Each structure stands twice: as C-alpha cells, then as structure tokens.
Amino acid sequence: MGHLSLLIPTRHLWLGSASSRDVVDVVVLLGAALVLVVLGTLGVVWARRRLVDTDDDASTAGLTLHDLRQLHARGELTDEEFEAAKAAIIGAHAPKAKPASTPRERLGGGPAPGTGAAKPPGPPGGDTAR
C-alpha cells in the first residue's frame, strides 16, 4: 500500500484531504459558471426576439389599401402600379393554399396502395387457392 501513495497524491483527491477552503473555491467557481450560462442563454433569447419579429405589427406598418387608393386618386400611382401594389398587399394577407394532391390522385387514380383504402376485388370466380 505504501507504493500506491507515491503514485497518487492524496492531497488532490476529492475525498482526500481537501480543505474547506478548496471546497468553497470549487463551489464559487461552479456558481460563477452557472451564472454565466444563464446570462448567456437569456442574452441569446433576447437577441432572437429582437431579430426575428413574430408579431404582425410589421405587416401593418406599410401602406394600406386606403393609402394606395388615395395615392392612385391623386395621380401619384399609375393604374399598373396601383394594381401591382394592391395584389401584393392582398397576397401577403391571403390564406395559404392547401398542399397539392398526390400525382396519382391528379391522374384520376385512387389513393396509393397501403394507405388504408379498400382492397381491390380478387380474381373472377372467387378464391383460387385450394
């Protein structure tokens, strides 16, 4: 057992002869690391909220259809400009279209095999297995 103590200094083992000062130092460093992680996380969340605007306030900050009509009535917009701007505003607020059907359904076929649809009828004359 005496040779083992030469290879592993017991002073640096956690369960060895660590003083209360060493334990306090470790706890303080772990606490500081935890505070830095929490502050970093809060900073990232704050920055993402500022950079990625999820509110619809940005869509109402521009021109409205009423504004476009007034500009068109005063002659500040041509008919083509008015129609293009009106289509852009309406298109931005239009509901999203339903996803396209599958190619098989577009060609007039039924649902794809294995999707829970009814099985096709068997061969004429009933069951051939005997």
Image: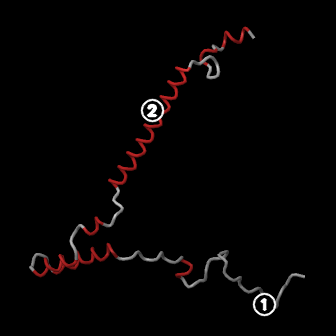
33 vs 11: above or below: below
Residue 24 relative to residue 115: left or right: left
- The structure residue drawn at horizontal position 29% and vertical position 66%, both measured from the top left corner, is 57
In percent of width and height, residue 93 lies at: 33, 74
- Dot 1 crowding, Cα within 10 Å, few <14, some 14–19, many 20+: few
Residue 24 relative to residue 11: left or right: left
* Residue 87, disc: none
- The structure residue drawn at horizontal position 40% and vertical position 50%, both measured from the top left corner, is 45
Quickly name the residue at label 2: 32
Quickly name the residue at label 1: 124
2 vs 47: above or below: above
Tag 2: residue type? Ala
- The structure residue drawn at horizontal position 71% and vertical position 82%, both measured from the top left corner, is 119
Q: Tag 1's secondary structure?
A: loop
Examine the image and state in which quarter residue 90 appears: bottom left
Asked if the residues shown at circle 1 and circle 2 are in contact, with their CB atoms under 8 angstroms apart, the answer is no
Say whether disc 1 or disc 2 marks the residue closer to the N-terminus: 2
13 vs 71: above or below: above
- Dot 2 crowding, Cα within 10 Å, few <14, some 14–19, many 20+: few
Tag 1: residue type? Pro
28 vs 109: above or below: above
- The structure residue drawn at horizontal position 46% and vertical position 34%, both measured from the top left corner, is 33
In percent of width and height, residue 85 lies at: 22, 75
Q: Tag 2's secondary structure?
A: helix
In percent of width and height, residue 49 lies at: 36, 54
In percent of width and height, residue 47 lies at: 35, 49
Examine the image and state in which quarter residue 112 appears: bottom right
Query: In what quadrant of the picture does the C terminus appear?
Result: bottom right
Q: Nearer the viewer, mark 1 or mark 2?
A: 2
Give the Cα separation between the discs numbered 1 and 2: 80 Å
